[in-house]
Every structure is written in structure tokens, then in C-alpha cells.
């Protein structure tokens, strides 16, 4: 066995960490470290936020015009942000953006019809926010919405 001095040990350790981090980021994105998922941000000109009401002009937000599409909204007046998913024609699921375990963003999984934490080994939630697996011990906050013409009105 080779005798390691301090310098060689630190250099080897740093390389191991760099390789491991690169592999993890390549497998699952860097959400485990950055807490940011892959859901695209909403188009800035497609929504307005007033007292307790968020309105989204769907004609300006193309991602939400298709079933299976999802966007996130981060805004100073929304401390946790929101994730909005088009689950069916005329149907939307809206929940708080941050997982209740570590605050990593959640993603919408259309094939599983749920929200999942973007972190490795992340928690899973039903579309109405109930925890169904993982380390989160609290549900996501769910928001109600009404669709009028091509405008989604969300009660905050």
C-alpha cells in the first residue's frame, strides 16, 4: 500500500469529490445541490399578480396550452413559488414549488400523475399535494384555480 502524505491525500480527495459530483449531476441534474429543478419558468409577460389572485393568460404561455406541460413561478410575493401543471383539457394542478423535506423544487411527472422532488431519492406527492413517499413529512400546499376563456385564475 502506498504511503500518502497530506498533499497527495487532499489532491486525491478533491478529485474523488469532483468526479462524484459530476456523475451525480449527470444522472439527475444538480437539483440535489442547487435545489433547482428542470421545470421551465413561466413567460414573464403571461401572468399578473394582484392581492390574493394570480392570473395567467394561456395564449401567452404555450407550455401550459398542452396537456402534460408545467411551469414554475418564482416571485417575491410568492415565498415558496408555485408549480402549475396542465393535467388534462381544462384541468390544472397547482401546488407550492418547494418540497417540504429540504426545499428542493418539485417537478410534474405526467406519466405518473404526480409531483416529485427533483432531489436524488426525492419525495413524491399526489396532484393535490399529499405525500406518497420519500422523506417529506408534510404535504405540498395546493391552490385552487378556475379557467375562464383562456385565462387561468388562481386563488393565492
Image (cartoon, grey):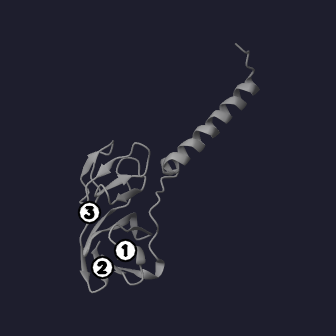
Whole-percent x, y for residue 27 in the image: 51, 46
Q: Secondary structure at mark 2?
A: strand
Residue bearing mark 3: 142
Q: Is the Cβ of the residue at disc 1 closer than 8 Å to that at disc 2?
A: yes
Classify the position of the C terminus by image quarter: bottom left
Q: Secondary structure at mark 3?
A: strand
Whole-percent x, y for residue 84 in the image: 34, 68
Nearer-the-camera pick, 129 or 67: 67
Residue in the image at 27% along x and 53% along y: 139
Classify the position of the N terminus by image quarter: top right
Dot 1 or dot 2, earlier in sequence:
1
Numbered label attached to residue 39: none
Residue in the image at 66% along x and 30% along y: 13
* 29 up-or-down from 141: above or below: above
Single out the mark in the foreground, 3 or 1: 1
Single out the mark in the foreground, 2 or 3: 2
Residue in the image at 33% along x and 42% along y: 135
In screen coordinates, is 45 left or right of 151?
right
Q: Secondary structure at mark 1?
A: helix
Nearer-the-camera pick, 16 or 109: 109
Nearer-the-camera pick, 98 or 76: 98
* 136 up-or-down from 61: above or below: above
Residue bearing mark 2: 152
* 113 up-or-down from 20: above or below: below
Question: Disc 3 and disc 1: Cα gap in Å?
Answer: 18 Å
Question: Disc 1 and disc 2: Cα gap in Å?
Answer: 10 Å
In screen coordinates, is 105 left or right of 34?
left
Question: Disc 2 and disc 3: Cα gap in Å?
Answer: 15 Å
Dot 2 or dot 3, earlier in sequence:
3
At label 1, counting other C-alpha atoms closer than 10 Å, the crowd grade (few under 14, some 14-19, many 20 or more) is many
Whole-percent x, y for residue 133 in the image: 29, 44
Residue bearing mark 1: 64
Amino acid at each position: 500500500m502506498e504511503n500518502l502524505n497530506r498533499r497527495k491525500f487532499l489532491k486525491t480527495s478533491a478529485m474523488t469529490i469532483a468526479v462524484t459530483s459530476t456523475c451525480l449531476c449527470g444522472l439527475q441534474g444538480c437539483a440535489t445541490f442547487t435545489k433547482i429543478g428542470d421545470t421551465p419558468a413561466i413567460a414573464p409577460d403571461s401572468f399578473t399578480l394582484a392581492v390574493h389572485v394570480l392570473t395567467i393568460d394561456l395564449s401567452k404561455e404555450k407550455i401550459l396550452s398542452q396537456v402534460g406541460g408545467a411551469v414554475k413561478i418564482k416571485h417575491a410575493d410568492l415565498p415558496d413559488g408555485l408549480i402549475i401543471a396542465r393535467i388534462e383539457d381544462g384541468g390544472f394542478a397547482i401546488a407550492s414549488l418547494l418540497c417540504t423535506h429540504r426545499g428542493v423544487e418539485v417537478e410534474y411527472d405526467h406519466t405518473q400523475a404526480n409531483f416529485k422532488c427533483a432531489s436524488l431519492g426525492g419525495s413524491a406527492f399526489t396532484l393535490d399535494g399529499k405525500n406518497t413517499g420519500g422523506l417529506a413529512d408534510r404535504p405540498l400546499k395546493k391552490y385552487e384555480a378556475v379557467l375562464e376563456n383562456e385565462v387561468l385564475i388562481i386563488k393565492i
